[in-house]
Image: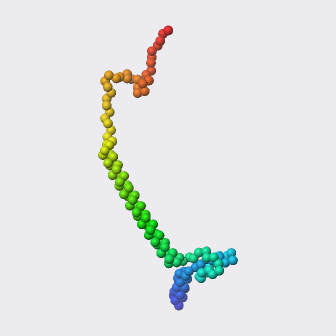
Amino acid sequence: MRSSALLLLLSMTASASMADAYRCIEGGKVTISNVPCVASKVVRSDNPSPEAISDVMRENARQEAYLAQREKQHRDDQAAMQRHAAEVARMYPQTPEPVKPSSPGISFGGCGLGGSCPTTSTRSR
């Protein structure tokens, strides 16, 4: 007896959850009903219509196709940039030039790289 009552209760709640629910504004108050609003403004129906579902599915498919196209274009652009970089590297190799020794006739005498040597000359007047 208990199991049949429980089964009956579960079937009633399952069928109630599948019913449409409408939120309507009547006299400034929001009411919820299982029938569409007659003389008041519909706030929202909890269950979308089959047309709305198919519209959403179409839009989702359109956006997925657009995203797939953009991802393919991005991959193609990346591959083209890599090919271009390889071609530039082949045409203009970036090997460092060897350091050439300074000419034997030029000597800086320990003045350093800046060319400022301390002078210790004294002048007499």
Residue 6 can be seen in this image? no
Q: Which residue is drawn at 38% across and 61% down?
A: 72
Residue 108 in the image, given as x and y percentages of width and height: 37, 23
Quadrant of res 40: bottom right
Residue depicted at 40% across the width and 64% down the height:
68
Q: Report the residue that reaches farthest toward the right.
A: 27
Q: Position of residue 112 (x, y in %)?
A: 40, 26
Q: Residue at x 32, y 22 (%)?
A: 105
- 19 displayed left or right of 90: right
Q: How many marks?
A: 0
Residue 41 left/right relative to 106: right
Residue sitting nearer the eye, 110 or 65: 65
Specify whether residue 117 is in view: yes
The residue drawn where x is 46% and y is 72% is: 57
Q: Indicate the colouring scheme.
A: rainbow
- Residue 22 appears in which quarter of the rendering? bottom right
Q: Among all residues in the image, which is located at the extreme top?
A: 125
Q: Nearer the viewer, residue 45 or 1?
A: 45
Give the percent coordinates (x, y) of residue 79.
35, 55
25 or 55: nearer the viewer: 55
Look at the picture and state if 62 lies above or below 40: above
Relative to residue 38, is residue 102 depicted above or below?
A: above
Along the viewing direction, whichever of 2 and 21 lies nearer the viewer: 21
Quadrant for residue 34, please give it.
bottom right
